[in-house]
Image: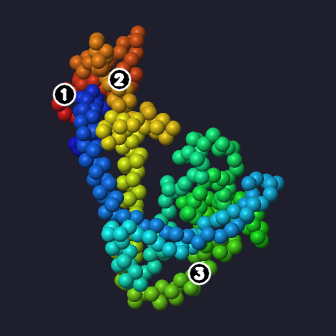
Amino acid sequence: MASFWYSGSFRQTQWKLLRDWLLRERMAVPARLDVIDAELRRVGLVILFFKKTKTTSQSGPGEAFDVVEKVTSIPVGLSVSAGSSLEKLVQSYVVLGGNPCEISLFLRPDEVKFSSRGTDPDEDPTDDPNVRASDARVPGVESSQPGFGVVAPENIQSYGPGGVNTGGYPTFDKFPYRRIGRVIERSEASAKISAKVEYARRWAEKEIAERRHQLEAKVIKLMDLREQLQQERDEILVQCVGGTVPPLPEPPDPRRFHRGLHLSRIVEEMDGVFYEKATDGSGPDFGTVNLGTAEKPTGLSLYDTLWYDGQGGIEDDPYTG
């Protein structure tokens, strides 16, 4: 069987093998972080700059309308990391006649900035946690991206022009029904046009596919890879091993990370399920299984899907999972 295939049902040796391997694997975290940082530099970053305009926003029912700045989804500029893989792909895309601003909005919600004096509103004693927010304005938050870097369902408090209810529309300016002004069956309304456009482009499908699949898809894939690498470095590793390896010396912030999901806490709890504690209090006694009794149900007696080796008369190999 594949290594460590189990998750919810396993016996003591399986847990011991997984436990010891995970604890040893922490030694590889410094090199792993170096690889992630190097990969992020190689991949690079695409940043779009957007046109800004003014709009009116109402904090709540019956309150006055304020004029606020809105970041539209109209790109006015683009920046790509010099010498990166993304720069080479974008250059190739431009050579083939493509506009890289059409590939994606390249939104980065984690890079929205707060205007408070601290790193976030929780550290600003003057911040009001009950302040009203809307799709157009979030007090105390600065953003250079449309929708504060997020495409989400729109929240409305009244019907729009012509009695159109745009509640649930994505906060994306190019949403088709927003342009049409109502919800229609688009496939029927556009059938004749679609047939003609399909014939107009049929002879050039290979060239279109080359732009779409060979370049556009690769740009999006690399941006997705960048996001995954950042999440692994800044969230997954911090949550699991933060405070126990040299590159991550600080324990995870309990306001962001659940202490109960840290590797050290999970190991401690699972050791307590499978094994009795050592008499000197130094940790688990791996030679004594915590079976529990009818009078004192503890350890394995509390779980139907966790077993000791040989439970049920089944002969188990004590050295394999």
Q: Dot 1 lies on which element? A: loop
Mark 3: which amino acid?
Ser
Q: Is residue 93 above or below residue 292?
A: below
Instruction: State the image coordinates of residue 151 (x, y, percent, origin top left).
Output: 56, 61
Which residue corresponds to mark 3? 190
Foreground residue among 52 and 29? 52
Q: Residue at x 19, y 33 (%)?
A: 320
**Residue type at tag 2:** Val
Q: Earlier in the sequence, mark 2 or mark 1?
A: 2
Residue type beneath disc 1: Pro
Relative vertical location of residue 248 with respect to residue 271 in this rendering, above or below? below
Provide the residue designation for mark 2: 273
Q: Is residue 218 visible?
A: no
Residue 283's mark?
Answer: none
10 Å crowding of disc 1: few (<14), some (14-19), many (20+): few
The residue at which mark 1 appears reads as: 318
In depth, the one of 18 and 126 nearer the eye is 126
From this viewpoint, is residue 237 visible?
yes
